Image (cartoon, grey):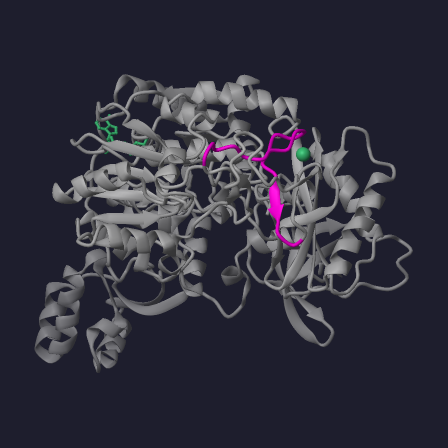
């Protein structure tokens, strides 16, 4: 007798086997009610298993199915297994990500309301009789006759209508039914949706659309990388491809880095599909549980046929998936920083292959992982090299801050004279500006303000990190250590010092320098409040703000025609973090940010402040040269064995107890090095760049291997054999995107 292996709901990830009662169609992915101790609980069937013959006791039978159909489709269950295996996490943790809490808990259920439906039109004589004897009933019939779909919620008929309705039901003229109502997240009608129609495509867009449509019909469907410069009209291509997919009777999944940060993209989808508004589902993070429940079931039943959402929407249970679009595929917000630590884009690629559907990864600055896949022929590359509005890409000016600091005599210059003048000009002309603060990493590198020299690791080509506690420089990849130089090794200036200034300091300076300007800052608070960010962006759109200051978070997909100046205050900070993607991120930031300028009829100007004007990522970005950048950067990655040529994972230990965290990681390091499978390179255990965070001490080591599975398996085996001290947490992050 096969049994059901059930993951019990609740925080403890309990898994038990239950006998399946005769005739109950239980398959993997079903939700079931089961006996647990002396209560009834719910759970998800992970697998159908054959219990060993010598089990020695009878399994308890499960009670019933909570839902007639499996809530997790076989393909999603397969994806779940792959994630557990690849990222080295439990299938239980993946199931939690797959089935949102709102869908799992029994408290949530569909909201129903009583609705009166016209059943048959009465004969004229009958109607005449009713009109005479029961005018109330006649009025209800008249209302129903004029209502959409000939039905009206009972509650809308007003108090005292029940008796009349009852009588009409008796006469079989109307029916009283329970109708499911959708808790519509947009029902409060905050945003007006203006329908729009497709634009005639230019030649490049035409080719891109053609490639996507061909793929939808093709037998094999390699992922498509749509590399299109900022403003080249990628979104228009997505919109038209999505429409054609829907016309073919299939469904569409659109992933964006973060809903609240891409309001304009979401709005364009809503507008384009305004005619089928009720088939569009936007999965915000601030949906209520009830709304989430309804949207999830609408998607599963095929009522919502186009779904827009961030990372976790990759698990949206769309049937008949025809097309997955991943916008801004290079964005690091696709990587989840909690268990399960999956990468939304990579899971999307996997899902597309399981579902046999087309997937398009779009970006103006493709990740080197995806780009390398096109070079190896695994992905297909399509390019959009011109701006759709015919404008040229904006001119990028690089400002050498070493010269500025000389003017400021030893102090750090925050705002160059050049940028200040440019800001003043914009304010005088009533044009708008955006200033970016690159705030990546609190990890401090050592950089000379007079010559720009940064202290780098000789073995890994990443910046060394300054550790104040013991006054040394350290490489976070190989463990190389160096003393802090008293003078700059390059120009002998003793001013070599810690760099970095916070957003607050910048705001202070700006307020002082531009007393008349209206300045607004997008900060973490603005991101958290439900509508604060949208209000702020709307105010900026309405030109009520002159200067918008923010981190790279606001570099995504914003389109403001009146913005003619974009400045980056500190392009270097991102460059000198102990992260092999530092150069790539700086290139992406500069390119994306520059893409915000000059998107209307007015020409745009971009000013980049930097201490290392000659650094390759800055120079390639300045010349809008992605290919040049990719070629050089891939060479460096190949040489130092970094992604995309190897998988890179980080193992971190954390504890409030410093010694125990350190000792645990050293123990793990020793065990990992015993029987180390060939091909894995094991880094040294080191304090994290951010050694103390939230009161916990953190230590980390990096592992690299060309084969992901070999790496994950080895680490999992060691972790399973190691008993951790109670107050130490160990985290394994496969394909890590953050090294702090
Ligand atoms: P991307 O997504 O590549 O940044 P968008 O799709 O936002 O580019 O397009 C940039 C601008 O060009 C938008 O204002 C868009 O309406 C416009 N646009 C896109 N395609 C066309 C086209 N074929 N003809 C005219 N304008 C277009
Ligand atoms: Zn090193």
Magenta span main SS: loop
Q: Decide if residue 326 is on the left or right side of residue 567.
A: right
Q: Is residue 246 visible?
A: no
Note whether 250 is above or below 620 in the view shown: below
Asked if the stretch drawn in magenta spans residue 11, the answer is no
**Residue 461 belongs to the span the image colors magenta:** yes
Q: Quadrant of residue 560?
A: top left
Residue at point 45%, 23% (across, down):
215
The percent position of residue 737, horizontal first and vertical second, equals: 57, 41
Lateral position of residue 681 relative to residue 233, left or right: right
Task: Name the spot of residue 168 as percent of width and height, x first.
Answer: 23, 73
Magenta segment range?
Answer: 450-469
Residue 119 drawn above or below residue 480: below
308 on left or right of 486: left
Q: Residue at position x 57%, y 46% from top?
A: 73
Q: Residue 142, percent across and down?
A: 13, 66
Residue 685: image quadrant is top right
Task: Relative to 284, say whether 425 is above or below.
Answer: above
Q: Nearer the viewer, residue 248 or 527?
A: 527
Q: Toward the viewer: 467 or 241?
A: 467
Q: Position of residue 343 (x, y in %)?
A: 56, 41
In the picture shown, does residue 46 fall above or below 610?
below
Q: Is residue 268 visible?
A: yes
Q: Residue at x 42, y 43 (%)?
A: 410
640 or 302: nearer the eye?
640
């Amino acid at each position: 007798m096969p049994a059901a292996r059930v993951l019990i709901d609740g925080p403890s990830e309990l898994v038990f086997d239950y006998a399946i009662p005769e005739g109950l169609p239980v398959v993997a992915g079903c939700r079931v009610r089961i006996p647990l101790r002396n209560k009834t609980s719910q759970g998800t069937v992970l697998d159908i298993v054959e219990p060993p013959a010598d089990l020695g006791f009878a399994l308890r039978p499960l009670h019933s199915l909570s839902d007639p159909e499996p809530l997790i489709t076989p393909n999603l269950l397969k994806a779940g297994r792959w994630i557990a295996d690849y990222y080295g996490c439990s299938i239980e943790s993946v199931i939690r990500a797959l089935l949102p809490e709102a869908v799992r808990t029994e408290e949530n259920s569909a909201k129903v309301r009583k609705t009166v439906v016209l059943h048959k039109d009465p004969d004229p004589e009958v109607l005449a009789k009713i009109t005479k004897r029961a005018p109330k009933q006649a009025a209800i019939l008249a209302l129903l006759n004029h209502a959409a779909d000939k039905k009206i919620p009972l509650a809308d008929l007003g108090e005292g209508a029940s008796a009349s309705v009852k009588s009409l039901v008796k006469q079989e003229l109307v029916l009283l039914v329970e109708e499911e109502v959708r808790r519509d997240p947009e029902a409060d009608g905050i945003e007006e949706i203006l329908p729009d129609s497709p634009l005639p495509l230019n030649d490049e867009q035409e080719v891109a659309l053609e490639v996507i449509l061909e793929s939808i019909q093709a037998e094999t469907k390699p992922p498509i990388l749509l590399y299109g410069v900022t403003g080249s009209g990628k979104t228009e291509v997505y919109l038209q491809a999505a429409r054609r997919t829907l016309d073919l009777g299939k469904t569409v999944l659109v992933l964006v880095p973060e809903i609240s940060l891409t309001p304009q993209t979401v709005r364009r989808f809503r507008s384009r599909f305004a005619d089928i508004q009720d088939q569009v589902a936007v999965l915000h993070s601030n949906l209520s549980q009830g709304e989430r429940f309804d949207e999830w079931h609408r998607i599963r039943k095929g009522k919502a046929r186009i779904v827009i959402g961030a990372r976790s929407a990759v698990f949206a249970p769309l049937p008949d998936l025809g097309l997955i679009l991943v916008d801004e595929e290079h964005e690091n917000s696709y990587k989840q920083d909690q268990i399960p630590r999956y990468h939304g884009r990579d899971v999307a690629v996997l899902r597309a292959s399981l579902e046999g559907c087309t997937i398009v990864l779009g970006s103006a600055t493709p990740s080197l992982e995806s780009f390398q896949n096109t070079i190896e022929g695994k992905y297909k590359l399509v390019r959009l090299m011109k701006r759709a509005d015919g404008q040229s890409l904006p001119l990028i000016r690089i400002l050498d801050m070493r010269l500025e600091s000389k003017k400021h005599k030893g102090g750090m210059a925050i705002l160059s004279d050049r940028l200040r003048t440019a800001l003043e000009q914009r304010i005088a002309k009533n044009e708008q500006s955006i200033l970016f603060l690159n705030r990546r990493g609190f990890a401090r590198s050592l950089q000379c303000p007079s010559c720009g020299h940064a202290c780098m690791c000789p073995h890994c080509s990443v910046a060394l990190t300054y550790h104040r506690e013991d006054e040394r420089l350290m490489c976070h990849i190989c463990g190389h250590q160096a003393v802090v130089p008293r003078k700059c090794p390059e120009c002998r200036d003793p001013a070599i010092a810690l760099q970095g200034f916070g957003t607050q300091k910048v705001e202070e300076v700006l307020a002082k320098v531009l007393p008349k300007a209206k300045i607004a800052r997008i900060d973490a608070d603005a991101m958290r409040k439900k509508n604060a960010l949208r209000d702020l962006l709307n105010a900026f759109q309405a030109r009520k703000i002159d200067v918008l200051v923010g981190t790279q978070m606001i570099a995504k997909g914003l389109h403001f025609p009146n913005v003619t100046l974009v400045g980056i205050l500190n392009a270097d900070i991102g460059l000198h973090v102990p992260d092999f993607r530092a150069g790539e991120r700086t290139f992406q930031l500069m390119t994306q940010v520059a893409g915000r300028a000059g998107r209307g009829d007015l020409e745009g100007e971009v000013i980049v402040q930097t201490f290392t004007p000659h650094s390759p990522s800055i120079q390639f970005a300045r010349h809008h040269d992605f290919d040049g950048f990719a070629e050089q950067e891939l060479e460096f990655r190949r040489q130092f064995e970094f992604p995309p040529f190897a998988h890179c994972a980080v193992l971190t230990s954390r504890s409030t107890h410093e010694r125990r965290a350190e000792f645990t990681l050293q123990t793990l390091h020793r065990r990992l090095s015993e029987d180390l499978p060939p091909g894995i390179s094991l880094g040294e255990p080191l304090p994290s760049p951010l050694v103390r965070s939230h009161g916990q001490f953190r230590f980390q080591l990096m592992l690299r291997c060309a084969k992901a599975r070999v790496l994950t398996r080895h680490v999992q085996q060691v972790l399973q054999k190691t008993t951790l001290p109670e107050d130490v947490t160990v985290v394994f992050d496969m394909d890590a995107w953050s090294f702090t």
